[in-house]
Image (cartoon, rainbow, N blue to C red):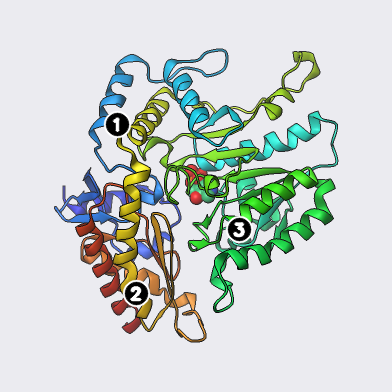
Amino acid sequence: MNNQDMANRDLAVLWHPCTQMKDHEHLPMIPIKAGQGVWLEDFDGNRYLDAISSWWVNLFGHANSAIIAALKDQLDTLEHVIFAGFTHESGIRLAEKLVEISPVGLTRCFYADNGSAAVEVALKMSFHYWRNQGQTQKTKFMTLENSYHGETLGALAVGNVALYKETYAPLLMEVITVPGPDCYHCEPGESWADYSTRRFALMDAALQQHADSVCAVIIEPLVQCAGSMRMYDAVYLSLLREACDKYGVHLIADEIAVGFGRTGTLFACEQAGISPDFMCLSKGLTGGYLPLSAVLTTDRVYQAFYDDYTKLSAFLHSHSYTGNALACRAGLATINIFQQQAVIETNRSLAVALTNAAARFHGHPHVAEVRQTGMIVAIELVKNKQTREPYPWQERRGLKVYTYGLSQGVLLRPLGNVIYFMPPYIITEAELELLAEVAWQGIQYAVSN
Ligand SMILES: *Cc1c(COP(=O)(O)O)cnc(C)c1O
């Protein structure tokens, strides 16, 4: 079997996510045969540097021996069991670990099986908490401009990326959308902290106006990843925590993309020293090996559901694969790596290497901004550097960077015209250099074709 054979078979029966399938009339479908470390290998023997951690999930490389060994052991013991009325050791141990390592006050863990489902759980729990408290007028959610929280209808409703949301608008619950702190829009010379503080006034005003009807504010701490990797300062989170307390509204931190070391701390909320009422985790939770998500919450929330059965106040949400034992074991193995290898500390020098590798892009005549938070670097490609006029989306310049990258053995997957690096934490400095060089050439190709 070579690439062509596999692609033909795929295109005869499969429908891929986030894809206009007609694109594959000219874009090659890349069938991957194996992965090793940061490298993927296709059926023709070509290799690709996985610069986007296979959609932001992979932390310690493909075919990681520690995670594989844990999974094999789990497979020989218990693959899965119903998680209502029953439990298992890996599910318990992972919850214990998550409670131990997450911000103070988050003492309860509820499992689901993907990020969107975790967001649904947090939304329903928040609403249901207020209802159990007799606050039935609280039925709305508040979200930020340019936010992304997943694709199921509830998660899509609290997101704000038009490309994914607009088509389905008639199906979605109404939310209150507040202008965000995205620091791409700060004034020349204005610091991220100042801009984020200034923009918080809009959130404060919205909270003041709507608090009575609002269950929770949902936010992606520090980086709006799917929203073109737009970033802001931690002060916004501190202010938001204070305001949510003041106005009696929950704070849901969606750390699905930014959790597990991506922003330079284990969780992004740590940089503001805050604890949310709900924290959603997925993606890196299993190191990129199996689908799993978790919602961490407080004892206060938990207690609001804890009563006699006949009060009908229980949280009855469930998924068939809730707390899957294999996925939980992958999560445990992943957290073990963090604890045994001091990943957050070693990532500090890797983040500096990322800064250095990306330095060359600042002066590029079609780059409006190079921004970084921890282990994420984003390069904003524009038509006009002075006015920041974007390239028309129809020109699909980012896609040209993607195809160029593939031709040179690097998997970049720009978000529109934003090229970003979000590599596994085991990438070497030499590989980062290669990545930056190919991205540079890819941008050259994209702006001149
Ligand atoms: C990816 C993502 C989700 C959705 O997770 P899925 O597992 O893809 O459903 C939710 N929130 C954020 C911030 C994400 O990046």
Nearest to the observer: residue 21 or residue 297: 297
Which mark sits nearer the N-terminus, 3 or 2? 3
Mark on residue 361?
Answer: 2
Which mark sits nearer the N-terminus, 1 or 3? 1
- Element at label 3: helix
Query: From the image, which quarter does the C terminus lie in?
Result: bottom left
Which residue lies at the image location 37% right of the left edge and 69% below the top edge? 399
User: On the image, which quarter does residue 105 sit in?
Assistant: top right
Figure check: 321 above or below 168: above
The residue type indicated by label 3 comes to Lys
The residue type indicated by label 1 comes to Ile
User: Where's residue 133, x and y in %?
Assistant: 82, 30
Pointer 1 residue: 67
User: Where's residue 380, x and y in %?
Assistant: 44, 72
Q: Residues within 10 Å of mark 3 (few under 14, many from 20)?
A: some
Which residue lies at the image location 23% right of the left edge and 45% below the top edge? 37
User: On the image, which quarter does residue 375 sit in?
Assistant: bottom left
Pointer 3 residue: 165
User: Where's residue 405, x and y in %?
Assistant: 27, 66
Which mark sits nearer the N-terminus, 2 or 1? 1
For the residues marked 2 and 1, what is the alpha-carbon distance in whole angstroms?
36 Å
For the residues marked 1 and 3, what is the alpha-carbon distance in whole angstroms?
36 Å
